Amino acid sequence: MAKEYETVIGLEVHVELATKTKIFCSCSTEFGGAPNTHTCPVCTGMPGSLPVLNKQVVEYAAAVGLATNCTITQYCKFDRKNYFYPDNPQNYQISQLYLPICRDGKVEIETEAGTKNIGIHEIHMEEDAGKLVHDEWEDVSVVDYNRSGVPLIEIVSEPDMRSADEVIAYLEKLRMIVQYLGASDCKLNEGSMRADVNLSVREVGAKEFGTRTEMKNLNSFKAIARAIEGERERQIDLLEAGEKVIQETRRWDDTKGESYPMRSKEDAQDYRYFPEPDLVPIVISDEWLKEIKDRQPELQTEKMIRYKEEYDIPEYDAKIITGHKKLADIFEATTKLCNKPKKVSNWLMVETMRLLKENDMEPEDITFSPKNLATLIELTEAGTINSSVAKEVFEEVFKKDIDPNQYVEEKGLKTVNDEGALRATIEQVMKENPQSVEDYRNGKEKAIGFLVGQTMKAMKGKANPGMVNKILKELL
Amino acid sequence: MANIISDETIEYVGILAKLELNEEEKERAKKDMGEMLDYIDKLNELDTAGIEPMSHVFPVQNVFREDVVTNGDGSEETLRNAPEEKDGGFKVPKTIG
């Protein structure tokens, strides 16, 4: 009989904090500047430069810790992690090993299997490295240090996850919390949120963990799910063949659907951590901690309850919308403009979700403005356009954030309310479809649907459906 | 000298420090490192039970910066340190990681 295996997964999630400046110097953290324009002697590791900690980094890190039920280390320090790599100009990274700012937290996740707590081992503050670009023409790499020194928090989970579903649910939960706090935009595709997956397998019922590997280069939820499946299979195959899993770091190649070892034996993983001598300890007093707590914005649960009460939308809708900060922001801004919460909720829940799915997008990728959605809702409510035209217009709003008023005007999409014109078209349709007319008159009520459809088609979708129904019934 | 550094250790430390030593340099480094460890052993003779490990020589804490951008375009000064430059970046041997 085939052995059954259990997958054991722990995650290391790096989040780039939304500060204006870097962690130890006053250079901008803005994404996308020309190479090396956001650099100075501190973030390029020049001898004699002195790092000074950005206070906002401590506040964001502590806020994330509080929102994930961690204990805040009120006396914490930085340490040096030593290694050579071209993207690391100091030849060490300032990080936290001995006294990380947050410890022993947990978040609750929900999957089809139910709810479960995932433990958070620790959260520490550290600096990001520069970016290596591989030259297309020459066999060299080019380093841009703009990202060097951008503040990161690393959220290290306990090995509490057992499936890709749980991993995705955990990541979505973390992302939501961090976004609500305004601590990061958490974009996986831009690298402001990065997840490394530690995975091992063991026979079901075994007490000890198997040997784990760490996988890097995972930049979408789908890639993470595929990498977990791929690595699980690889490790089981090794064990079934009587071989051993080697503890190593592997790089996932999502196009090939396989991983390969990243480091050679020459790169020993021996970081020789020691206390960072250039930075003084951080003492977070009870008062400071209280200030951080008091400043915490409304989080998902509170928002969900408020939406149900204030806007009277169904619990299910409130849960989905508040599940993504971006959706909640659009919902509130649009509702403020048009004062029709249920309509706004419907557009988000149905058409927006459909288009996101079709285009393989995340809510974070939404580009349309609350103003244009509000205008579209007003046009529909006033009967200026009918619901099928509205869907068509919404696709344009979703794609290009067009102004619905202008679009409807230019394309001539206004609903035809002219009774004379409708009556003429309907008479024509009835003449062309005597069978359906006959069926209806003989009691087949469904036949009217076909006639409505034919009329709408003849009017290029712009007829007022209520009027079409009314006139048809009258003429029949 | 109480501490004897093996060839394997000096080889390993060389890899970590990205240094290539010739035979003569290796012998000298082995001797220096041995003496350093002897000195550490000497310090270890002190009874430090109950003493907080010191991480900083001055009793200073909470030195912070406010989150305000004050540095401008530093690329020119930064790139002056680049042995070779390409497209505004530091040109280095091909590195994939």
Image (cartoon, coloured by chain):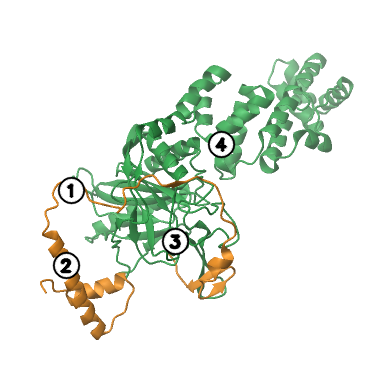
In the figure, the shade used to draw chain B is: orange
Q: Where A137 sits versus A248, above or below? A: below
Q: CA distance from mark 4 to mark 2?
A: 60 Å
Tell me the residue that label 3 is attached to: A49
- In the image, residue A75 lies at what x, y percent? 31, 42
Q: Amino acid at mark 2?
A: Tyr
Q: Amino acid at mark 4?
A: Lys
Tell me the residue that label 4 is attached to: A326
Q: Is residue A463 left or right of residue A148?
A: right
Q: Earlier in the sequence, mark 2 or mark 1?
A: 2
Q: Where A167 sits versus A330, above or below? A: below
Tell me the residue that label 2 is attached to: B39
Q: CA distance from mark 2 to mark 1?
A: 20 Å
- In the image, residue B58 lies at what x, y percent? 32, 51
Q: Where B48 sits versus A473, above or below? A: below
Quarter of the image with the N terminus of chain B in it: bottom left
Q: Amino acid at mark 1?
A: Ile
Q: Chain of mark 4?
A: A
